[in-house]
Amino acid sequence: MNASTTTPLIPREVLFGNPEIAGVELSPDGTRIAYLAPYRGVLNLWVRDLDGREQPRLLTRKTDRPQQSAGWTPDGRFLISSRDAQGDENTVLVRIDPSTGDTVDLTPPSGVLAIVSASDRDVPGELVVGLNDRDPRYHDLYVLDIASGERKLLYQVDDGRPVGVDRLNGKWHPYLRTEALANGGQAYELRLPGEKQWRPFLKFDFEDARLSGPAGFTRDGQWLYGQLSTGEDKPRLVRWSRQELERCTTDCRFEVVHRATSGSLGIALSQIETGEPAVLVETDLRSQRFLLDPSLRSDYDALERLAGSNEFSVIDRDRKDRLWLVVVASDRQGEQIWLWDRDRRQHQLLFSVQPKLDDYALASMESLDLKARDGRRLPAYLTRTPLASDGPQPLVLVVHGGPQARDYWGLNRTHQWLANRGYHVMSVNYRGSTGFGKGHLLAGEGEWYARMQDDLVDAVRWAVDQGIADPDKLVIKGGSYGGYAALAGLTRDPTLFAAAVSEVGPSNLRTLLASIPPYWEAVRINFERMIGVGSVDLDAISPINHVDQIQRPLLLGHGANDPRVSLQESESIAAAMTSRKLPIDFVVFPDEGHGWANPRNALAWAALEEHFLQQHIGGRVEPFGDVLNQSSMDWRLRSLPTP
C-alpha cells in the first residue's frame, strides 16, 4: 500500500471549520473565563466559572457571521467586543453583560470605525476611543463611560496628525502626536502633563521610521518605552525617563534595554503592576525568549518542561498575576490551552482548540535559508506532503499578504491541508517582508512586480533544482498582496506556474491607490513609497495591463464589501480574461470583506480551491458535499466541472 491510500484525508471541516473553543479571556479576579464556541454552527460568546462546576452560559446568539472575541473590563463588570457590517471594517464597540448577555452598542452602529486607544485599571469604567464620525479621515479621541455609554471629547484631530493617549498623573492625557512627512519619514511631538504646547521630540527619515518610534508609558508614568533602529539593521528596545523628557527637546537621552540580534523584537510579558517589559521575544525563522525579570525564571522553566519540544506563550493573566493562561502548540500539534497556577506550581489542561485535529498525523514544517539571485537572504518554510513517493512532487507556493507582514513557523492549517492533499507547500519571506531587519524590508521599496516577484520565482526554482518540485506542477496562491503576486505569476512568468489562486488581490495599482479608505491617510505616504509611486510606472506593474500574457487558469475570489481592495479589482481582471476566452473561475461572497470571516464561506472556498488544484496539478480532494450550498457564494464565472 502506498502513502496516498494509508494517509487519511483530513476533512476541511477539521482544518477550517469552527474551532471547539477560541478567544479565551480570563476574568481579572481569576474566577471566570469568556470564550467563543459554536452555538448552532456559529461561533458565539460564552462564559463559565474557571473551576467548571456550573454549566457554561451562552451570552450571544449570532446566526450568520461569527461573534468577535471579547475582553473583560478591568473590574470584570462587563465584556467589550466588536462587530462590523459584513466585512466593511467599520467597527462598532459592543458592551456585553457577562451575567445576562445584555448587549449595548457603545459607538455609532454604522459608517464609523471605532478604535480603542487606551484603558487603565485605575478607571475600569472608562475607555478612550477614537471615532471618525466627524471626518472619515481622522479619529477624534473620546473618553467613553462604559456603563452609561456617554462620551466626552478628549482631543479633536484637525490636521491629520494621530495622537497617542495614556493615563498620566491620574488623568487621560494626549501625550504624543505623529506627523507623516512628505518623504515618508515620521516626526513625533510630545506634550507632558502641565504643558500647553506640543514640542518636537523625535524625527526619523523614511528608512529609520520603518522600525523606530515610541510605544507608551509604564503605568506609573516614569518611563516611556519604544524601539529604535537608527544606525543599525536590527531593532533595539529603549526607554526615556520622565525626568529626562521633562528637560530635553530633540536631544533626549535614552537607555538601551535590549539590542536584538533578530529582525523582529516584541514584548511577550510586562510587569502587571508597573507595566515594564519583563519578557522579550525575538523571531527570525524561529523564536527565542529573553527574560528581563529573573524572578520569572522558575515559571518559564516549568512551562518549558510542560511544552517539551513544542512552543508556548502566555496569553492572559489574572489581576494578581497568580494564574496564567498558556497556549502550547507546534508545527505538528493543534493549540492547547493550559492554566498555570504560579502559587501551587501546578498546570492544568483546559482545552484543545481543535481536538479532532489530534486524530491525524501532521507534517513537519522545515525552516529554510534560501538565496535570491542577487544574494539576498530569503527566509522560507517548506512542508512536504506525506504522500510523496520518490522524486519531484507538485508544489504550491503560498504568498503572504501585506506585503509588510511575514510568515511564521508553527501550525499552519493551509500548509497541513495542502500537504495532506498531495502537494509540497512553500512560503517565502520575500524582500519587503517585515521581521528580518530594516534592510530586508526596505529592499522591497519600488519592487512590486520586480525583485519581490523574483524572490518568489527564485524560491520555486530552488525547489525544482533540488528535485523537490515538479516543474510542470507549480501553483502560486495568496490573499491581498499574495493575491496580487498570484496574478503577477500568471502575467509576468506565464509559463512557470500551471495555475494561480488569487483571493482579494489587487490587479490595478492605480485603482487600488484611488480606493484607499480615508482613515488610512496617515499611512498613505508609507504605502505609496513602498510601492514606488513617482518612480515606478504603475501601469507596468499592474497585472490588468498584461492579461494578454496569461496562458494558465485562474481561480479568483473576492468579498463584495472589501474596503481595502475593492471588488472592482477582481471584476476587471475577470472581464479581461473572459474577453480573451482564458480559463477562469470567479467567486464573490456578498457578505464578506477582505477575506472570509464566516467559516461556511471559508469551507466553500477551500473546497473550490482543492478541486481547482486537482483539476490542474493532480492531488486528492474531499467531495464537495453540500458545502457550496451552505455558503453565500456567487460563482460568477466557471471553468471547473459543475459539482
Image: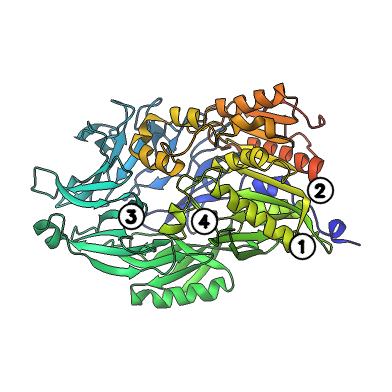
Decide which of 41, 18 is in the foreground and name it.
Answer: 18
Mark linked to residue 620 = 2
- Residue depicted at x 62% and y 60%: 381
- The kind of residue on which mark 2 rests is Arg
Residue located 73% across and 39% down the image: 607
| Residue kind at label 4, given as amino acid type | Arg
Q: Position of residue 74 (x, y in %)?
A: 32, 50
Give percent across and percent down for residue 349. 56, 64
Q: Is residue 561 left or right of residue 193?
A: right
Q: Where is residue 467, by image quadrant? A: bottom right
Q: Nearer the viewer, mark 2 or mark 4?
A: 2
Q: Nearer the viewer, mark 3 or mark 2?
A: 3
Q: Residues within 10 Å of mark 1 (few under 14, many from 20)?
A: some
Q: Position of residue 492 (x, y in %)?
A: 64, 40
- Of the residues shown, which amino acid type is indicated by label 3? Asp
- Residue occupied by mark 4: 53
Which quadrant is the C terminus positioned in? Answer: top right
| Among numbered discs 4 and 3, the one appearing first in the sequence | 4
Whether residue 41 is visible to the viewer of this picture, yes or no, is no
Q: CA distance from mark 4 to mark 3?
A: 54 Å
Q: Which mark is residue 467?
A: 1
Q: Nearer the viewer, residue 203 or 40?
A: 203
x 39%, y 68%: residue: 260
Quickly name the residue at label 3: 208
Q: Is residue 447 above or below residue 254?
A: above
| Crowding near the residue tagged with mark 2, few <14, some 14–19, many ≥20 C-alpha atoms within 10 Å | some
Q: Residue at x 29, y 58 (%)?
A: 226
Q: CA distance from mark 3 to mark 1?
A: 41 Å
Disc 1 secondary structure class: loop
